[in-house]
Amino acid sequence: MAESANKRVRIIDVSKYFGDVQAVRNANVEVAEGEVVLIIGPSGSGKSTLLRCVNRLETLSAGDIWIDDIHASHSKSDIRRIREEVGMVFQSFNLFSHLTALGNITLAPRTVKKLSREQAEADARRLLKRVGLSDKEASYPGQLSGGQQQRVAIARALAMNPKVMLFDEPTSALDPEMIKEVLDVMLDLAREGMTMLVVSHEMGFAKAAADKVIFMDQGEVLEIGTPAEIFENPREERTKRFLEHIL
Amino acid sequence: MAEVKQTRIEISDGALIPDRNEKSVFSAWRISFFGAIALLVILPIVKPDPFWDILKFIPDGILRTFQVTVSSIVIALFIGLVAGLGRISRITIVNRIATVYVEVIRGIPLLVQLFYIYYALGQFFTLPPMVAAIIAMSVCYGAYMGEIFRAGIQSIPKGQMEAALALGMTRAQALRKVILPQTFRVILPPIGNEFIALLKDSSLVSILAVSDLLRRGREFASVSFQYFETYTVVAIVYLVFTLFFSKLVAAMEKRLERGG
């Protein structure tokens, strides 16, 4: 226990089946407090599925996941505790389309944490400022650009004060000129010491912020290393071939 | 602007049907609606006997028709919400009960249901005709509403539920605060259409001796023997109301399309 005490996230022997298809095979990943871990790999390699296992948007077929000292067993209350500690940002933003930016950010603190409206809105305004969208608090998602929507989505996740943030291809649905504004917010978060698990192929972000890079293929975690190790000196043949495609 | 996916129940945009009609001053809707209004004004002036007498005789019936329609739609909405939630429930027994209700009710003609509740069940307990009518109409339309609710809920992208769950909300909270508010917006137009259908179907309750619009017409005609004149007026009055409400639904649809 002692050596894993400072591990924020421990993914132990996790497997996930969809019917007969094994999406994740015996994955073992540890993320220390404040660490930024990037998951890369070809599409269908199980990156997103692994990420979604962490906050139990997918049930596990086998294995264990710990967030600090919370073990996400199958009980509903444990799963909800995990989800309160783990924020998630989606590829398609998934902002609540009937609520303003402010409403999106305050909904969970008010319903889950039972914060007062004043308290939740004060927090939300601070977060909107942090992501550079103070002037958009009354805008509906449909009135915001993709980059702005994703920044509101990040603020929404941060409003629950998570210990860990999951990013599932946060920039894949964005036009090129909007990718930077989202990555900048993520870089700030990384600098402030947020523990992050990121599925992305943004090499700039990887080099600037990632402490570790994980390469997955066909559901398997093939390689874990520093960005330098993985990008410049991959051990596995499949990692090499994949990197040739995206670099 | 990045593509923002808007969700609504799929309506074909009918690219092959020319839409010119809509913009003309003499649109089909205007011809029908104002034509009907004009007839209702001109006929009693030109021929007060019997048209003026008919118009004086039927307002009670219009009131009754609206009482039945509005009460039934309100109750049907409530039944529909419960049935719709039942249809998407992951608890097998709840799901099965809701599905059986929808299948059975949709498979029996409304007229037969009216007979059944008033006459068949009337052998065990007697309901006032008005109450029997409202029960039959709400139970029947509740099944159709249930399908509208189900389709509406299922039309909300699954990312909305996932985002709510990922924030630590329970399924019930997510449903109440995220899914249903969006569902109501999507299903407003189809509910409006059900309202119009119910308004028309409410004429069936006249067979239970509820003095609705149709029944009042029949009462007038059977005394005066002026069937042609009476039923012409009855038909026009129904037409004015249904055209009015269908325009309202269309306006609602347009607003929903514009406002994101």
Image (cartoon, coloured by chain):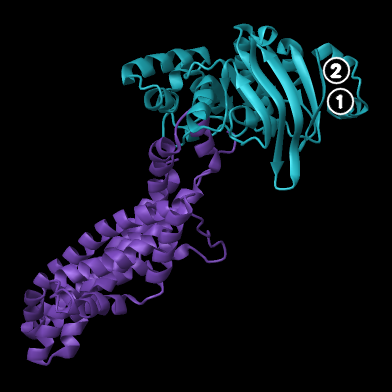
- Numbered mark located on residue A243 in the image: 1
Chain letter of the residue beneath label 1 in the structure image? A
What amino acid does circle 2 point to?
Phe
Residue B61, percent from left and from top: 13, 72
- Residue A60: x and y, percent? 65, 35
The C terminus of chain A - image quarter: top right
Say if residue A180 shows up in the picture: no
| Residue type at tag 1 | Leu
* Badge 1 density bin: few <14, some 14–19, many ≥20, Cα 10 Å: some
Residue A246 in which image quadrant: top right
> Label 2: which residue?
A231
Q: Which chain is cyan?
A: A
Viewer-nearest residue: A148 or B15: A148
Can marks 2 and 1 be said to lie on one chain? yes
The disc, 2 or 1, on the residue closer to the chain's N-terminal end is 2
Crowd tier of the residue under label 2, counting other residues whose Cα lies within 10 Å: few below 14, some 14–19, many 20 or above: some
State if disc 1 and disc 2 touch (CB < 8 Å): yes
- Residue A144: image x %, image y %? 51, 30
The chain under label 2 reads A
Please tell me which residue is depicted at 38% across the width and 14% down the height of the picture: A122
Query: Residue at (42%, 40%) from the top-left corner?
Result: B175
Residue A34 location (% of width, % of height): 64, 9
- Tell me how far mark 2 sits from mark 1, CA to CA: 7 Å
At x 27%, y 68%, the residue is B137
Tell me the number on the disc at residue B19.
Answer: none
Above or below, comparing residue B56 to residue A102 in the picture: below
Task: State the hue of chain B.
Answer: purple
Q: Is residue B222 above or below residue B116?
A: below
- Residue B211 left/right relative to B187: left
